[in-house]
Image (tube, rainbow, N blue to C red):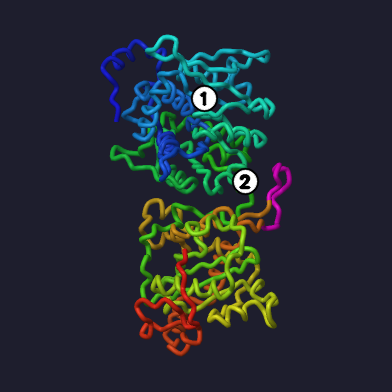
Amino acid sequence: MIQMSPEIAQAAKVMRDYFPSLFMRLNTAQYRALEDMYTLTPDGRLPDLVSVEFANGVGKSHLMIIVMVGVTMGPEYLGVADYPPCAVAYWTNLKAKRDAGKLSLRLVCTADDMKAGGSVYELLKAVFPWAKPVSKDNNDVFRQIDIPHPSLPGVKNSFAVKTFDQKEDKHSGSTCDLVLINENLPENLTGETLARTRGGGNIVQFATILDYSSQLDELENGERFIMRRTKGHIYENCIGSQVTDEMAAEVFEEIGVMLGKDSKGGYKTGGVLQKSKIDAMIEGWARSCPHQLKARKTGKPISSGGKIHETFSDVVHVKPGAYLKKIPALYPVVQIVDPHPARPDASIWGVVLPTNRLHIFREWPTVEGFGFYEQIKEKRFTVSQKCDIWKKIEADEGFADQVVARVGDPNRFKEPNADSEGQLSDLYADHGFDFDLSVCDSLEFGFEKVNEYLYYDQMLYRFHPEDPASQARLTFSESCRNVGRAMKNFSRKVSRDRTAPVSSVVDEKFGCFAGCVRYFVVWHADNPFNTLSMARAAKSDDDRIREGRIPNRFRQAESSINLHGRQLAGVR
């Protein structure tokens, strides 16, 4: 980590008026946001977009100015000891471009932000007075921010200023190393703004999202476009010694962040606001804009955009790969399949625990082998090929003899078979996959049941996450990325312009894997662990052979064919 040089430390004493950023520290939300901005992806690049979605009063615009300082001046003009090493390293690596005055930078904001007295203009004066707003237009908007190099006369780096009121063509231009956005970018400017970083730069947006932002969700669902979203609760900017257990529990409950206990009392936040000030702010919002209170306080949007499983959390419900990596021999496994007419069938395997909790540990197709499920454009496999693949998965991963049931979508499996008499399920049964189609298919009942299984005691989890009583009844392996995306994004249809109410109609984009989860949960409600373990004990080798499976005691160690004599190809 870079240490502030003695010369700069001495200069800082007389340059406080120019570089107050040297003496500013971060709260926990700001620190976390910088980690998201500057932690590199596995292929060594920055995320394409980071959305800093703080509550009011957490310091998002202040953080934006801090980023300006780090990029254009270098980390030595910040209190580097209190900054994430990844941010310090990135700002350090910009030195060559910074010294040459070749940084290509852009700020996008409202026109009022960059007028004298505007929020960004005033923050620049307070936090980064070395920066000089210039090039005022006919509407008194400063269209450029110049940052002179501190030690190389004549060298400067500049932020071009674009505003929300300008037409789309005014937002075109050359590629940028960095685009900073103050407040939620209008949807019509998204395309042009994203195009500015095609040369490898990145975008950071700082905004309190008062209502659901559909374009952010759509960007988050990209396969190659890397987006990170960082939340920040107003209590994270409260003086740590004044933060109570109830406040810390609310931070975790609302945004999933656990504040660290301070041995001296309270919690470690790095915050600067008095609790009494925060209480007054909250009271003011409750009176002036009660419908926006929660969003302004927690950073969570007012609307979920029609999300069906709002409780789903990556922190609580997604388990690391080591969890139940080897399924205990006595735990029954269930396969659930939702056929699709234009893509490979969506299939999951879940295990029923003795506590009647459910854990989904395997999916097919996988993201690694096929990409995101909703983006697959071809069916690829015949019924016999799919059945062979599923058998190979079960055999290779060692849970073939634990499968006690196969549950299928009772609608699609009952469709007529196009190739022969009977229904689609008969074709699968011919290959040893006899699906139970008796599961209840009421959507609303199923949604309610899944949400019931996703429920967890948030207060208990906050303080005792290891306590079984604090755990949800439904969890997922981190390897099941398609399932996780479906749970996070499955929603009812919402109008583009947000003027119409949320529809009762379900958006089927993520419906297949979400449907598998729903069938599993509803089916399990009538098939608890004790009945499944009894059924499994009663199953004979003859039963397994009739299902097209090879019992363990007859299976060769390196068998490459199944009972039908078909070669088993590699699968993902």
Q: Visible in this render: residue 267?
A: yes
Mark 1 neighbour class, 10 Å CA radius: few under 14, some 14 to 19, many 20 or more: many
Label 2 sits on residue: 303
Farthest residue to the left: give it: 6
- What quarter of the picture does the N terminus occupy? top left
Disc number placed over residue 352 in the picture, else none: none
Which of the 4 image quarters holds residue 149?
Answer: top left
Distance from disc 1 to disc 2, alpha carbons, whole Å, reads: 33 Å
Q: Residue at x 51, y 28 (%)?
A: 61
Q: Secondary structure at mark 2?
A: loop
> The magenta stretch spans which residues?
494-506
**What percent of the width, then of the height, locates residue 547?**
50, 83
In this rendering, the label closer to the viewer, 1 or 2? 1
**What percent of the width, then of the height, locates residue 552?**
38, 82
Label 1 sits on residue: 105
Tag 1 and tag 2, C-beta contact below 8 Å: no
Q: Amino acid at mark 2?
A: Ser
Q: Nearer the viewer, residue 572 or 524?
A: 572
Q: Nearer the viewer, residue 237 or 368?
A: 368
Q: Residue at x 45, y 73 (%)?
A: 392
**What percent of the width, then of the height, locates residue 555?**
38, 82
Q: Residue at x 36, y 58 (%)?
A: 466
Left or right, 108 with reference to 60: right
